[in-house]
DNA sequence: GATGAATGAGTTTTCATTCAT
DNA sequence: CATGAATGAAAACTCATTCAT
């Protein structure tokens, strides 16, 4: 009887979970959550159907697991704090570039997760609570500070941070919807996005 | 023998189709395409299961029908043309306000359609072909013209129109993801969005 | 209110029934009884689905109707009686030739009817009672007489007439099974069949 | 991880397939292919509905499986070869007796298969290709040889072997159609059949 | 009588989940 | 723990039959 608190056991279990989630992400991205079958995921992971149920209570838990993986990327909170030292323009540019790269890396997970996130209220609640709320809270503080300092226009903070997030999210969604232009010029899109967000579309008038 | 080309027959058929699509939109929005059952849609529409199949060949055709409904709103192309008489700032403000209102109206359809659109390649191809491509083409022409006239910054046109579209799309997705702030201040969000898109986030420097 | 005993009404009804049965035979032959739909039959007959139910109580009754049509060919009994004047060899040749022609003519009906006849006990019972039993009875009398007269080998009469019938039936079945040789040389097959039945396969020894 | 090439696994799989096919044959014979339900077959086999689909891809595959079983009886080709040592009369008698016994044994399968074979073109093509064509080919060679040796009448070989086959088939069909005389005297029928086929019905004339 | 839209029972098939090995 | 065969609930879809027009 293996000791469940044994750290080696723990690591083995974690490794197995990751193996399964990786396969799940791949199959979900390809077929979508509902059309993906446990059998396909198991085959992709190179294990038996039943084994999955030793690590996850049911198919839905795989989605939760994927969401956690999205969350585990440890860099996110750091960058807003870095922002306090950089000026906003530089920060937003760096941040968006980084974020776009990260989104691209997580695109497979996103592709499997997002459609279900739009539909599944439980998942949505968890996503709200675990990812969106904390992110927005940090961002709101940061933006509020910048506005107070007169570095940003005095727009409503809550909406502004959401519109910023929405812009990046929208580009990702367009990508997932199969838009060839975005797919082929992903990094470029990030740059144009920061340019628009910083200075707007309008040509500044010259005196 | 009722004439199948009889306009009254036609109208009855169209009315029934709309009744079914309305129910489908509602149930898809609530449960998602896959978890929605024909039985639920039929119950919602107040008809028998089999009746649905007298009007649509299969469940997927309901999605296609919903997509067509999205497409049938006849106003879209008009507005870009109106833009040629307004100045860009006024146009974008009016356009986005209108667009946000329309999205909100179509939100139920969008909620049912979008998740499946992210997953179903056939549907995606049709959406690309029937909705996105024509829209982008018109917008690209219009933006290209504005840039040539020096009214807009000389950003890459293809990416710019997509980023504009992505921003609105992203706000809608955030809404669908259950974000309370966006849900409660939908029209406000539209306004902030146009402000950001027009002038950027940065405070303009004062001499 | 049309008088149901009106002979003109009767004829109209009969004509409509025949029209429906003709369509049914065609569709049954093509798709088989179960895969044939009332809609297809109605379309083939150029009428509405519901109209069929004004003439036949249900789909199965169409099979019964087809069986009756098979039975209505008025020539069958005649030929055995003719046999009493011809010698057996001439009679069998003529009879089989005629029978093969008739089977070929009824092949469409047979193709729709036979598969269901092999499966449907009710239909089988009616076929036994209405077609096979009377035919075999007449044939048994005739063969019994011939044997008594020393014109035929003294084989068991009941089995002999059935084997004779079975031979022709078997050729028809082989035809329905798609055998190209039989399909292409149907009349020839009838001739060879009578030769075999009359003189056997063996070469007669020559003194 | 059980090896899928493990001969024990193979045998278990084969045994299960046979169990299912046996049940299918029984239910098909009783109700006919279309009226037979997967549920009935599963109940008859003593397993769950879904289990059938672990062994056969769909209901039609059960028919194919039954056809293969019919084909697997390994004795068929042997007998024609034996015929080369026996004289024809003895051979046909032995052969038909054997064949009739075999048909009787396979009658349940035949009853389920034949009606569908008359209706389903795919199945028909496979039956032609896998069973009828090879059988007829062997038989034609054998009969051709006998005719060349003057042991048989010089009838058209292709038609003759088909008429021989048709006779046996016809007797089986008569049986399936519920003819009591054939059902009760099956073996006798075989004997009469060989007598007729060998010497014909006519009394030989005595000098 | 003719029509064909509406009905819903009944079928095949899929697949998440269980559990004996 | 791993396995994968067995399970059976659940869903899409078909189509004979009815009946209001």
Image: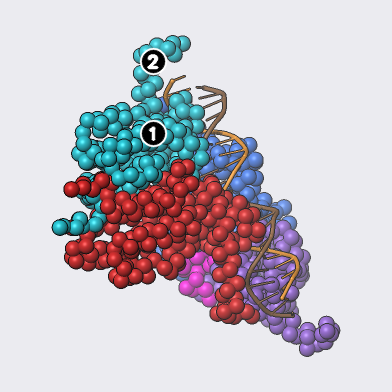
Chain colours: A cyan, B red, C purple, D blue, E brown, F orange
User: Which residue occupies the extreme bottom position in the image?
Assistant: C8
Which is more N-terminal, label 2 or label 1? Answer: 2
Residue carrying label 1? A137
Q: Is residue C2 left or right of residue D98?
A: right
Residue for point 48% across, 60% down: B66
Q: Main secondary structure of the magenta part?
A: helix
Range drawn in magenta: C168-187
Circle 1 — which element?
helix
Circle 2 — which element?
helix
Q: Position of residue A65 (x, y in %)?
A: 42, 31
Residue carrying label 2? A9
- Can I make out residue B196 in this image? yes
Answer above or below: position of C77 versus B57: below
Q: Position of residue C197 (x, y in %)?
A: 59, 68
Mark 2 falls within which chain?
A
Q: Residues within 10 Å of mark 1 (few under 14, many from 20)?
A: few
Q: Which mark is residue B200?
A: none
- Can I make out residue C44 in this image? no
Q: Number of marks in the image?
A: 2
Answer above or below: position of B193 versus A39: below
Q: Quadrant of residue D32?
A: bottom right
User: Which residue occupies the extreme front position in the image?
Assistant: B207
Nearer-the-camera pick, A69 or D113: A69
Residue C170 among magenta residues: yes
Cα gap from disc 1 to disc 2, whole angstroms: 37 Å
């Amino acid at each position: 009887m293996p000791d469940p608190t044994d750290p080696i056991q723990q690591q083995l279990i974690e490794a197995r979970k990751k193996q399964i989630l990786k396969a799940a992400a791949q199959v979900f991205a390809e077929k979508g959550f509902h059309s993906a079958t446990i059998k396909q995921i198991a085959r992709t992971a190179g294990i038996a159907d039943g084994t999955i149920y030793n690590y996850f209570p049911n198919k839905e838990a795989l989605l939760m697991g994927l969401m956690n993986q999205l969350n585990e990327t440890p860099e996110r909170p750091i960058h807003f704090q870095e922002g306090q030292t950089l000026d906003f323009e530089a920060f937003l540019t760096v941040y968006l570039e980084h974020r776009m790269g990260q989104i691209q890396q997580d695109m497979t997970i996103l592709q499997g997760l997002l459609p279900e996130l739009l539909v599944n209220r439980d998942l949505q609640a968890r996503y709200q609570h675990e990812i969106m709320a904390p992110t927005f809270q940090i961002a709101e503080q940061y933006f509020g500070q910048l506005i107070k300092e007169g570095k940003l226009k005095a727009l409503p903070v809550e909406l502004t941070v959401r519109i910023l997030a929405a812009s990046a999210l929208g580009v990702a969604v367009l990508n997932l919807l199969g838009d060839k232009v975005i797919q082929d010029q992903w990094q470029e899109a990030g740059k144009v996005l920061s340019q628009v967000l910083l200075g707007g579309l309008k040509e500044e008038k010259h005196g």
